[in-house]
Image: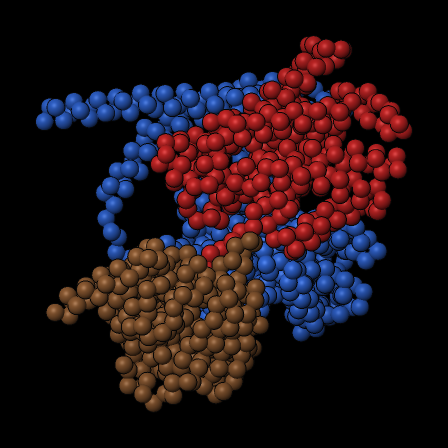
Amino acid sequence: MEYFVQQLVNGLTLGSIYGLVAIGYTMVYGIIGMVNFAHGDIFMLGAFAALIVFLVLSPIIGLAGVAVLVLLLAMLVVAMLVTSLWNWTIERVAYRPLRGSFRLAPLITAIGMSIFLSNFIQVAQGPRNKPIPGLVNNVYNIAGISISLKQIVIMVVTATLLAVFWYIVNHTPLGRAQRATEQDRKMAALLGIDVDRTISITFIMGAALAAVAGSMYLIYYGVASYNDGFVPGVKAFTAAVLGGIGSLPGAVLGGLLIGLIESLWSAYFTIAYKDVATFAILAFVLIFKPSGLLGRPEVEKV
Amino acid sequence: MAPGNATMTNDDIILKVEHLSMKFGGLMAINDFSFEAKRGEITALIGPNGAGKTTVFNCITGFYKPTMGMISLRQKSGKEYLLERLPDHEITKTAKVARTFQNIRLFSGMTVLENLLVAQHNKLMKASGYTVLGLLGIGGYKAEAKRAIERAEYWLEMADLIDRADDPAGDLSYGAQRRLEIARAMCTEPEFLCLDEPAAGLNPSESATLNKLLRSIRADSGTSIMLIEHDMSVVMEISDHVVVLEYGRKISDGTPDHVKNDPKVIAAYLGVEDEEVEDVIAVVESLEGGENA
Amino acid sequence: MAENIQNSARQDDSLFQKGIKEGLFAGAVSFGMFLLYIGIVTEQNIHNELVYRFRWGALAAFVLIAAVGRFLIVTVAQPWLAARKANAKPKVEEKGLFRKHFLKIALVFLVFYPILAVTLAGTQGSLKYVDNFGIQILIYVMLAWGLNIVVGLAGLLDLGYVAFYAVGAYSYALLSSYFGLSFWLLLPISGILAAFWGMILGFPVLRLRGDYLAIVTLAFGEIIRLVLINWTDVTKGTFGISSIPKATLFGIKFDASKEGFAALFGLAPSSAYYKIFLFYLILALCLLTAYVTIRLRRMPIGRAWEALREDEIACRALGINTVTTKLTAFAIGAMFGGFAGSFFAARQGFVSPDSFIFMESAIILAIVVLGGMGSLVGIAIAAVVMIGGTELLREMEFLKHIFGDDFTPELYRMLLFGAAMVLVMLFKPRGFVGSREPTAFLKERKAVSSSFTKEGHG
């Protein structure tokens, strides 16, 4: 039982990270109907930004007491800013000119961007894994279950961000503009919504969440690599689809589920086949529920 | 009426719909709807917007599975099919029911001729030995392909599209696209043809061309037609039999003249209270009198 | 008159100002983007600790390039493009002699290509040209043509095509090393096995559309790769299977033995002969793929695929069984992937799961889309440009003289590949060849403009 709860905690931690990245996929998909394949690499850029900030700042302010908190905050904020800038630029340069064109064209530019970004980091920062010393190493033992401070930080930050994010989407004019653009881009434009700006902001929000996820990933595993964008990216995309692409709660649910599947499968079966299990369950769910768990079924009028 | 009609026995029923009901969630789109369509006739299904006409079509052509009811089709050969039990493509392939769509569904990136060849898929597939023999150049695929092109040419002539045969279907004018969709449906050699608002959005001259096409289909190919239509001039001019649907229920059924004068139909279309129906009839009659004079 | 000049001068002025403004903005944005990644580099020191150092020069160069680039785009490129658009005359398509006979010329060139390479670079020197360029490109041509059936014709977005390539490669590798079966027997078997897997994987996903289909095909591709990695008893996992038997020519082996090809024809032993043989083999396989695709397009099944891409519901209304139509597209596309896979195994003599990563699927899909979905010629051109172009980078040793000795052009291969994918799509969203050849005609064969064709929903 304790073992099970332990795995549950581990799974939820991992799932939080996937969920944060999945939101970026699902938002962009919802608003412009495009799979932003480069989103996983935005996540990786976030991890690298946090890594570099850590390297630069930690010798200056140290790792004691409040300093860690400041450092963490700095890592998060800088990573969010930098990746937002990147995602904004990518949208402007590679996706916006193709809006309204052939559906596969932006998918291909996104794949191209993904290849470009991971290779850019490989060339600029070198191909080796980049380890950092543990940032928060406290581990608490609650009723036989060990929870590290890292895990608590990850879950708290995720929950806070989700709350903020949920508020923005549902209770601000910006969120309303986003939802309107999602429903009908032309009509939204006719009603005076700046569609281009709304889409840009969506990309920025997605990137910021991915940056947080990237920083968390770095803190959790203590290492970053140029090709870290791919596997978590695919997992997060899987999460978004599993939850029903376009649905925000779906993305979070999908992320948590995938995190749980992974950790429980590794714990009770073989770690080698954990990804196989994830993908197989995805395929299985989609076969019976072709639009994901919380997605609206696609009804084509005859 | 068309000459072919006289030789048909009037009780030769091609399509029989019995107690058809279709429920979407809690909404009863079709409620205990029954009617019959006779062979060689043009049956019109009319009704106000949202009455469930297209839903009836979708049930007949297998795109929806009805919640309840039976749809039976009897071919000339005497073979009977229960359409609600067949998958959609089998309804076209074996039961020989073809359809068109309210919002035109052509293969717009393929040429007009190709559209008509796709419609002859099953026949050509068999002739090509399910691709294997055709790929090796064995068997009668070449001859059948030639016949298919001839059949397509025939329908292109009928639909007045022969000059556009090698143009992309998406390049045609709206009216021509409507005719092409009908020609394409006819290339499946149906016994029963369902047309969903064939005259919608057509100008008067296009409407006239369409009427000509529909009449010649009935006269030359012996195909029975059922159509959904809003344009009353089309309905009254070409149909032999009219069924009126309102809120998923049948409110009238009979000859165009009978339906035209049915107070319930008038009320449904004009949305008047029951007691006013008599007045409406009076107005309609006086208007008709004026037209005749 | 004078007013006009003044006006245009004022326009130039404002254009210049706009250029400066946008250039500065681009500089600022790029400073933010590159500060961390270019301005600072992280490295491990001798104690294996991560340290950093600044690279201000490189950062300055990046910012400068971005600012000046943006300035030039605004002041020079954009007005020029606008002017060209305004003055664009309806061009009469006058096909030159070269374009008219492009296919014949290309085919003749391909047939003589190895001979040309041997004459120009010598037997040993030809290896590079025949193998790295010729065979490498042709493998991708074949894979892209195979995927074209699924994506380009039937409009089913498949992101896991590399799985069938893997099935083909491992079928050959395993069956030849465990049972000693010959290449010529295993080539068709690999194709059939891949087609079989195409059906198995295709069946459950038939109901899925668009991006759901894409992710499930991606998932299946990954599942097959992960099984290859983890089923170590059979596949030897990440170590891969090595010393896979080579293909033979009518029983003649390509080795240094007495019965070997070189000895038999009295030639000096060289691995080049095997490569040349492989070149013709893959060329033949490509031609087979093209022939079958062209024939199939003119058959009912091929038309049904394209009709499916255009409108699935209309297909059903015309009595077309969309389930079998989709499955045949998956199966036939997979079959060509399987052929290519067994060829790949015979060429490398070694297969490992590393060759069948998602990136390969992405590259193949990119070639199909960049070439112009459905167009065999366009796809071949895209394969030559993308694969040939990146292979070319490996050869650019002279760049070392410019950028110094620690400059390795190979590192930039995929970077430029990604950038090229973006650029080509931006300028040619419909690919190199956008129009579609009709499969039948009454009077004249007119190409269908890409503005009419659809790309499918699933």
Q: Indicate whether A133 appears above or below B64.
A: above
Which quadrant is home to the C terminus of chain B? bottom left
Q: Quadrant of residue B162?
A: bottom left
Farthest front residue in view = B275
Q: Indicate whether A255 appears above or below B181.
A: above
Farthest bottom residue in view = B7
Q: Nearer the viewer, residue C32 or A107?
A: A107
- Chain letter of the brown region: B
**Horizontal and vertical percent for residue B169?**
35, 63
Q: Quadrant of residue C104?
A: bottom left
Name the side, left or right, on which C154 lies relative to A76. Answer: left
Name the side, left or right, on which B143 lies relative to B218. Answer: right
Name the side, left or right, on which C276 lies relative to B118. Answer: right
Q: Nearer the viewer, residue A15 or C3?
A: A15
**Horizontal and vertical percent for residue A88?**
49, 30
**Horizontal and vertical percent for residue A24?**
58, 35
Name the side, left or right, on which C299 lies relative to C249. Answer: left
The answer to whether any part of residue A207 appears in the image is: no
User: Image point 59% across, 63% down: which residue?
Assistant: C330
**Horizontal and vertical percent for residue C95?**
31, 59
The answer to whether any part of residue C161 appears in the image is: yes
**Chain C: drawing colour:** blue
User: Image point 82% across, 20% down: which residue?
Assistant: A138
Colour logic: by chain
User: Image point 25% across, 70% down: which residue?
Assistant: B209
**Chain A: drawing colour:** red
User: Image point 64% across, 46% down: which residue?
Assistant: A293
Which quadrant is home to the N terminus of chain B? bottom left
Count numbered badges in the picture.
0
